[in-house]
Structure formats: C-alpha cells, structure tokens
Amino acid sequence: MADRAGPQARPGDWVLIHNVVLPAGSRAHGVPPETQAVPLEMRVKGFLLDGPALPGETVSVRTLTGRVVRGSLVAVNPPIPHDFGSPVPELQTIGPELRRRLRGDRP
C-alpha cells in the first residue's frame, strides 16, 4: 500500500518522483553480483502535471529539460540534502594569492 503521509501536490508544484527502472536480477550479465541483487532506481525532480496527488500515487512530471516522466510521488518541494561541506581555510587564500602572483606583486 502506498504511503499517503505528506502534503498534497497540485499541478505545477516542484516534486520528486521515484521509479524502479529494472528490478533486482534484471541488470546486464556483466554487472557484479552485489549490484545485480538490488533494483536500478531513478529519482527525478520536475513540475507536477497531474493532480492533485498524495505521496505514493503515480504521477507525471515535466523536468527542467522538458522530458515527461512518470513515477511515484515522493515529496513536494523536496529539500536539497547535500552541500560541499565546510570551507577549507587553506583553499580560501588561493584566489587572492594567485592574482597577486600574476600581477607580479611581492609578498
């Protein structure tokens, strides 16, 4: 049964969908066994074309590149969970130092 928790999405909302492209065991023969044992999944963000819809329902989205993709609705306005970490102090001075050297300035 689909998970119906979460906000209802409306047409035009930015959403995340999920789909199983290949079930476990259906990958190419040269794929390692540990990879063969899990499904090939896709997650795609786009603008909801169907609706209203709840998480778990099958919907269509239009991606930023114009593709129309179908999948199970996961989230409305999905967060961006990754970042590039904390600044590295040693790298923060590289740009100004390089410009100084290119100008021929002395330290």
Image: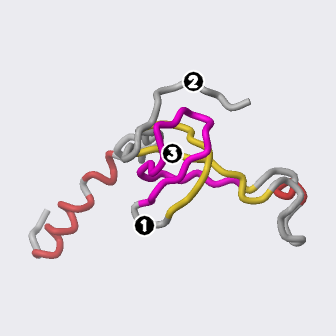
Q: Residues within 10 Å of mark 2 (few under 14, many from 20)?
A: few
Name the residue rendered at 9%, 70% in the picture: 105
- Judging by the rendered image, the residue that carries numbered circle 2 is 5
Left or right, 70 with reference to 50: right
Which quarter of the figure is the C terminus placed in? bottom left
Instruction: Give the distance between the C-alpha atoms of the residues marked 3 and 1, in whole angstroms.
Output: 15 Å
In the rendered view, tell whether residue 35 sits above or below residue 79: below
Compare marks 3 and 2 and give the one earlier in the sequence. Answer: 2
Compare marks 2 and 1 and give the one earlier in the sequence. Answer: 2
Which segment is the magenta one?
A: 41-63
Q: Quadrant of residue 35?
A: bottom right
Residue 82 or residue 63, whichever sits in front: 63
Compare marks 3 and 1 and give the one earlier in the sequence. Answer: 3
Residue 66 disc label: 1
Query: Label 1 sits on what residue type?
Result: Gly
Q: Secondary structure at mark 3?
A: strand
Which quarter of the figure is the N terminus placed in? top right
In the rendered view, tell whether residue 99 sits above or below residue 39: below
- Judging by the rendered image, the residue that carries numbered circle 3 is 16
In the image, residue 61 lies in the stretch drawn in magenta: yes
